[in-house]
């Protein structure tokens, strides 16, 4: 094994064995993806919270449901929050069922709730998308990095076997370049775990708000003549 | 509204931000701290205070000056008084050698003035004495050369002993609570090339931890610096080394 004095970052990666380099490349890709999703979810959840607050405000201050429905439908896709969609789905279903004669009140309410439930689940699915990826990155990438490190250290010691007088200088560069893989795994994992926990918490809060809104809106609809 | 294709307006900015985060991180790694190890000077080189050995070993036998009126002071330090003695005699022998030469012209002048038959004998005697003196001087010069060689060898031996001591002492890790005047005496058996065959404790310092530390240091110092010369090495086969904590041994 060649003993080099140069331990620069680029040198360490360049000198690593092919498998370790592959692991590093994979981790870099995973890290890029996870940061992309982190920013994506950050913007999406921030918008969702803002739109939810806006709609709740409009809902409780404006008791005219027709006007509210027009308002919800008129806003562009970007400015349409999950709660607006739940409201629109429920309201449309309610109006449709009311127009049909011979449907009793409880059946109307049940249909309305089903429609809202379906939209709610679709919206939750949209909000929770990519979160599973962040969770996987957070739990798996340290192990991938560790695998690269173990492999690199194995190689370093195999090289050491051919040297009669073993000194620290023989192993140190190999171990250093192997440890870069662990560093990269941790670099990918830590933000992913933090982001996952934070986003899961925020989505949970949003989901509670949607649930309560569904119940309250059902009550409002039941009072409708 | 279709459920499968989500409307995600932030794909591009999020991607750019992810790239920015990574490039910032790698820039920090690359420029943030010095990855190159400083080539530090070898501590063994800085501690070594002994003059270079080969110079002396080569120079001393090469200068067999006859009139060594001033024996080099290291020779006195080398404890070999019985061999140094003839060396001191030598300056005295030189005047003896020069005297007949000075007296000879006088005798020749006497011979020229008075060609006496019995005058031949002192002349022959003086010639014989001169030859004898010359032989003695030559012998003494050879002796002196040999002495100097021995002295040089002695110095080499001392130098190597000092080097061995220095090397071992560097490796001694003093255990806590060792007396300043603890003395551990070891008999070290060496193989040619300086490999340590064994290190026997001859006289314990009274502190087992210090004895162990010294023994470990001796084994750790393998190979010890020894002369390449096989004759000189014979004086290193068995080394009696004395170690004291904190102070130069011997």
Image (cartoon, helix red, strand yellow):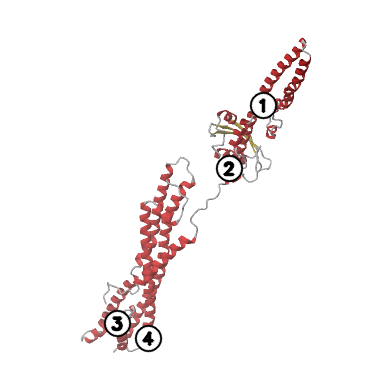
Task: Name the image quarter holding the N terminus of chain A.
Answer: top left
- Residues tagged 3 and 2 counted as in contact (Cβ below 8 A): no
Task: Name the image quarter holding the C terminus of chain A.
Answer: bottom left
Q: For marks 2 and 1, give the CA distance.
A: 40 Å
Say whether residue A120 is visible.
Answer: yes
Which quadrant of the view contains residue A206? bottom left
Q: Secondary structure at mark 2?
A: helix
Q: Secondary structure at mark 3?
A: helix
Please state the chain letter of the residue tagged with numbered disc 3 in the rendered image. A
Q: Secondary structure at mark 4?
A: helix
Furthest toward the front, the residue is B113
Which residue is the site of mark 4? A60
Q: Residues within 10 Å of mark 1 (few under 14, many from 20)?
A: many
- Is A31 left or right of B144, judged from the image as shown? left
Rendering coords of residue B244 (x, y %):
65, 40
- Residues tagged 4 and 3 counted as in contact (Cβ below 8 A): no
- Residues tagged 4 and 1 counted as in contact (Cβ below 8 A): no
> Mark 3 or mark 2: which is in front?
2
Q: Which mark is residue A88?
A: 3
| Callouts 3 and 1 in the same chain | no
Residue A145 in the image: above or below residue B94: below
> Mark 4 or mark 1: which is in front?
1
Q: Which mark is residue B144?
A: 1
Please give the name of the residue rendered at 76% of the width and 14% of the height, measured from the top-left corner: B122
Say whether residue B187 is visible.
Answer: no
């Amino acid at each position: 094994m060649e003993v080099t004095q140069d331990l620069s970052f680029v040198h360490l990666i360049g000198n690593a064995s092919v498998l370790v380099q592959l692991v590093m490349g994979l981790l870099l890709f995973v890290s890029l993806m996870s940061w992309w999703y982190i920013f994506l979810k950050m913007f999406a959840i921030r918008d969702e919270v803002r739109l939810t607050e806006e709609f709740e405000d409009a809902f409780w201050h404006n008791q005219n449901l027709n006007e509210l429905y027009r308002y919800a439908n008129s806003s562009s896709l970007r400015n349409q929050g999950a709660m607006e969609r739940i409201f629109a789905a429920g309201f449309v279903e309610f109006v449709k069922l009311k127009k049909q004669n011979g449907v009793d009140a409880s059946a109307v309410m049940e249909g309305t709730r089903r429609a809202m439930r379906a939209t709610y689940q679709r919206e939750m699915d949209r909000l929770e998308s990519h979160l599973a990826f962040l969770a996987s990155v957070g739990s798996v990438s340290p192990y991938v990095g560790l695998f690269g490190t173990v492999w690199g250290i194995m190689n370093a010691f195999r090289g050491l076997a051919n040297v009669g007088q073993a000194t620290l200088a023989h192993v140190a560069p190999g171990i250093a370049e192997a440890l870069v893989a662990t560093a990269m795994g941790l670099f990918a994992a830590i933000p992913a775990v933090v982001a996952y926990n934070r986003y899961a918490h925020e989505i949970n809060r949003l989901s509670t708000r949607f649930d309560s809104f569904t119940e309250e809106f059902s009550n409002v609809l039941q009072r409708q003549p | 509204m279709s459920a499968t294709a989500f409307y995600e307006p932030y794909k591009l900015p999020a991607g750019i931000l992810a790239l920015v985060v990574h490039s910032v991180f790698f820039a920090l790694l690359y420029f943030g701290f010095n990855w190159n190890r400083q080539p530090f000077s070898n501590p063994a080189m800085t501690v070594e205070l002994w003059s270079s050995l080969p110079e002396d070993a080569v120079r001393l036998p090469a200068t067999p000056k006859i009139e060594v009126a001033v024996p080099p002071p290291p020779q006195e330090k080398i404890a070999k008084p019985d061999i140094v003695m003839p060396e001191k005699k030598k300056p005295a022998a030189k005047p003896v050698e020069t005297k007949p030469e000075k007296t000879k012209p006088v005798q020749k002048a006497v011979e020229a003035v008075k060609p006496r038959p019995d005058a031949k004998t002192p002349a022959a005697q003086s010639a014989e004495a001169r030859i004898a003196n010359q032989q003695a001087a030559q012998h003494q010069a050879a002796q002196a050369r040999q002495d100097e060689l021995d002295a040089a060898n002695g110095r080499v031996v001392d130098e190597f002993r000092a080097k061995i001591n220095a090397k071992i002492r560097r490796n001694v890790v003093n255990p806590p609570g060792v007396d300043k005047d603890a003395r551990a005496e070891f008999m070290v058996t060496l193989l040619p090339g300086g490999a340590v065959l064994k290190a026997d404790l001859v006289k314990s310092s009274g502190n087992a931890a210090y004895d162990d530390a010294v023994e470990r240091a001796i084994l750790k110092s393998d190979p010890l610096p020894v002369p390449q010369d096989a004759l000189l090495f014979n004086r290193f086969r068995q080394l009696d080394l004395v170690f004291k904590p904190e102070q130069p041994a011997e």
